[in-house]
Amino acid sequence: MGKLKQLTIEYRLLLYKKNLNYFVFRRLIESFAKRFLCLLSCFILMISARSQDVNGIWRGELTQEPGGCYPKYFIELQLQVNDNIIEGVSYDYYDTSKYVKLKFNGRLNSSSKRMVLIESKVTEFRIPWNCIPCVKTYDLTWSKRNNEEELIGTWKGSQMGTKDTCPPGKIFLKRVASSSFKTEDVIQDEQLVNIQKTLKPVIRKVEVIQTLLIETPMVKVELYDNGQVDGDTISVFLNHQLILYKKGLSEKPITLNIPIQPFKDYEMIMFAENLGSIPPNTALMVLTCGKKKYEIYLSSSEIKSAAVKFRYEK
């Protein structure tokens, strides 16, 4: 009986060890599965976030119902997005010598991946004399097929300068790396365009304070008076385009949200309109690019302007 009892105890110990090993193994598998699902969720979120970055150049075809100049055109959209607000320019063309260039604004719905773009102004056109530019509204949806991004939808519009409708149609676009036309590095407010036309050239030395490589298509710029508020007034130029005109610096920021194109060089110049009561004209510029923030101290005078250069490396 004593030997049988010992064997029974050893058998129970063996079963206990097996159950313990199984329990530990099961916990390890459950822990691994949770971590894997967490990583998979993060990956899906990253892909989703990327899919909603529609900044850049899109090119394709625009069809039109009977009654238009041509049954089918080529079209290119240059999109710049800031907090789901879209600005840009469009080119609809038969070939690159016959085209209409327009400005547009719109909104992006990130959850449905749908956008509506409304052309507001014809800025240039070179088309046959018997054709009239059409100012259009696009209803587009983003998708991805065979590793290619697409914008597909419909459009409608009216003839430039009238309320006469254009024959509507469909639009098919794919993301492309470069433009068939000149890309708009800076989208300038129409009022600032008119102001810049009246400005007399002033030659000043430009001192580049810092050069940055950034990783986002949007730069938030905040400008403060550096030190005592003394009435400093500035204008700001981006790639020689006026984006801020005669604004006074204070302890509260002047904020600019600037969409930028990938692989383009940008130079932002702070031009002193006066020197305030304590020369020179000084400012603190805070640049926010995604999760990164840069604080840059600028000083401009009547003989030099301070500048910051940056480039978006996608």
Image: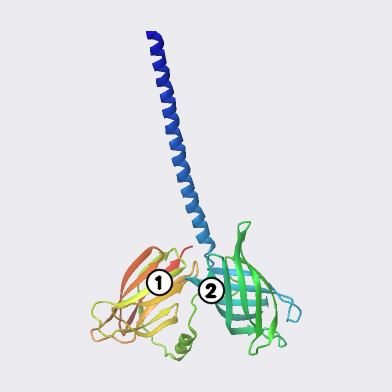
The residue tagged 1 is 220
Q: Residue at x 45, y 69 (%)?
A: 218
Q: Secondary structure at mark 2?
A: strand
Query: Neighbour class for label 1 at 10 Å: few (<14), some, many (≥20)?
Result: some
Q: CA distance from mark 1 to mark 2?
A: 19 Å
Looking at the image, residue 12 lies above or below residue 46: above
- Work out whether mark 1 precedes mark 2 in sequence or the reverse, and give the earlier one: 2
Q: Quadrant of residue 66 in the image?
A: bottom right
- Disc ID at residue 107: 2
* CB contact under 8 Å: marks 1 and 2: no
Q: Quadrant of residue 276 in the image?
A: bottom left
> Looking at the picture, which amino acid does disc 2 mark?
Arg
Front-most of 132 and 159?
159
Give residue 53's position: percent from left, percent from top: 52, 65
> Looking at the picture, which amino acid does disc 1 mark?
Lys
Left or right of residue 299, residue 22 in this image: right
